[in-house]
Every structure is written in C-alpha cells, then in structure tokens.
Image (tube, rainbow, N blue to C red):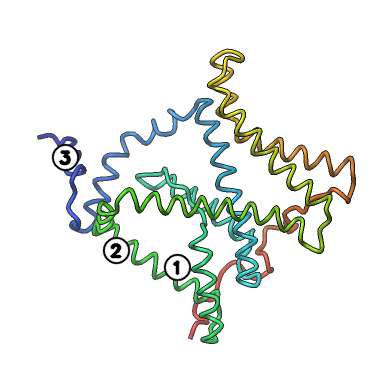
Amino acid sequence: MSDTAAIEADDKDPPLFEGLLKGITRDYKMRLPLYKSDITDGLNTQCLAAICFLFFACLSPAIGFGSLFGAVTNGAIGTMEMVSSTAMCGFIYALTSAQPLTIIGSTGPVLAFVAALVQLADKMGLPFLPLYAWTGIWTSGILFLSSITSASNLVKYLTRFTDEIFSTLISFIFVVEAVQNIGRSFTNPASTFTKGLMTLIVAVSTYVTANTLRGLRNTVYFTQGVRKNISNFGPTIGVLAGVLIANWAKISQGAAATLPSLAIPPTFATTSGRPWLIPIMDLP
C-alpha cells in the first residue's frame, strides 16, 4: 500500500488518541501538495463573491459584538480589539491550518462567557484583562494538547443534532440582536422617530435587496452568466445598497436623518486607550 493510500485509509477511521504530532503530520501531508491549488483555484468570480460575502459575514459580528463586549467589559474590550483580533487570527489560521474553511469570530455564547467572567473578576476583586488573558492561555494549552495527541478526534461522537442546534442558536442570536437594535433606535431617548424609521428602512432594504438578488439565478432575466454573477454578489450588493441609502439620507436630510456610525479612533489604538499588551503577571 502506498503512503498516500495508507494516509487516506487512516484518515477515514482515525483512532481517538495517537502519538505526538502524528495526526497533525498526516493532515499536513495531505494538504501541502494542494496548498498552491487551494489559492489558484479560488481566482474566479464565484470565489470573489464568496470572499465579499464572508468579509461582511466576519466584519459585521466583529463590529456588533465588539460594541456589546465594550458594554459588558466597561470598555476593556471593544470594537477595535474585536476587528483586529478577528482579522489577525483569521489570516494566520487560513495560511497555516490544514483545514482553513473556518470562520474566526465571536459568537453569543462567547459573549455570555465573557460577561460571566467579568462578574467573577468583580466578585473576587481581580483585574479582568489579566484573568481573561490567562483563561485564553489555558484554553490554548488544552487545545494544543488535544491537537498533538489527536484527542480532537473525539468530535466524531458529536451528532448532526448537536451541530444544528448550535447553528440554530447562533442564527437566533444574530436575528434577535438585529431586531433589538432596530427596536432600540425607536425607544432610545437619544434617538428620534426619523432615525428609527431610517434604521428600519436601511435594514429592510439591505435584506430585501440581498435576498432578491440571491434568487435571481432562478429567473429568466438576463443571460445565465449574468444571473449567476449578480446572484453570487447579492449579499454584497445588498450591504452596499443599505450604505448608499444611509448616506443619501445624511446628505439630503442632514443631522435629523443621520444614523449612528462606528466611532473609529484617529490612530490604531485600543478602544479605551490602554496598551495592547496585557500585564498578565498582575493577576495574583
């Protein structure tokens, strides 16, 4: 049996635990010959559409959860930290992992965990950021041990039910958060009915445009190639349409219809102005 055939046969039903680095070595042996084609095969319009879609799919929760993290952590972790860490981790993971098709970003359960960790730090009188950093270090260590011993193969016992329940939870959190943001634009004392109505119009326009264009491939309009390209870029066009509507309202109606935008510091700095490096030794 050739080495490739042996690797493929071993990969179909790997043991739960293996020798140090054996599983990682097998993964890289399988992926390295295809590393170049993984990049060159993506040089087409369909992959470009997927890249644009994933850009907004990663950026939107990073911004949204960044603001929520800022509220939960009292500004210790905010939008700047979320966007920069999502970009850096996603870039490194995509270049070095044997399976790069994973979206790196925060989710609702992570936010709930961070909120609980903030409360724990307050009760114990501990600095939050060093505690959070050590939590990440220990988590990284556990994941590293799981990787080099192939303990990650235990995921084969997770059923499709587990995967779909978690996916449903994440989707539900995103939908609820979007609806709550629209609702707060009407109920927030700092907002006005005009701004609330503009928020609703932008949200509905973005969704309807993206959803309509995504379904264009099943119509008889234009040629098949045009329908396919427009459909692939549907979500991106929908987001751009929402941005254009918001900017048109700002230019034509002035401050009365200007929607709140993300506050970006003039320099690349943390949300609160603290140093990027966390003094992990400050934890007693």
Quarter-wise, where is residue 7 in the image? top left
Is 170 placed above or below 3 here? Answer: below
Q: Earlier in the sequence, mark 3 or mark 1?
A: 3
What residue do we see at 41% from left, 44% from top? 100
The CA span between labels 1 and 2 is 14 Å
Report the side of 135 relative to 222 (left or right): left
Q: Are the residues at dot 3 and dot 1 in contact (C-beta closer than 8 Å)?
A: no
The CA span between labels 3 and 2 is 24 Å
Question: How many other residues sit within 10 Å of disc 2, few (<14), some (14-19) or many (≥20)?
Answer: some
Say which of 140 and 164 sits in front.
Answer: 164
Q: Quadrant of the N terminus?
A: top left
Circle 3 or circle 2, nearest the eye: 3
Is 204 placed above or below 174 here? Answer: above
Numbered tag placed on residue 9 in the rendering: 3
Question: How many other residues sit within 10 Å of disc 3, few (<14), some (14-19) or many (≥20)?
Answer: few
What residue do we see at 68% from left, 69% from top? 272
Secondary structure at badge 2 equals helix
Residue 224: image x %, image y %? 54, 15
Quarter-wise, where is residue 213 in the image? top right
Mark 1 is on which residue type? Gly
Residue topped by disc 1: 136
Residue topped by disc 2: 145
Mark 2 is on which residue type? Leu
Numbered tag placed on residue 118 in the rendering: none
Q: Are the residues at dot 3 and dot 2 in contact (C-beta closer than 8 Å)?
A: no
What residue do we see at 54% from left, 78% from top? 119
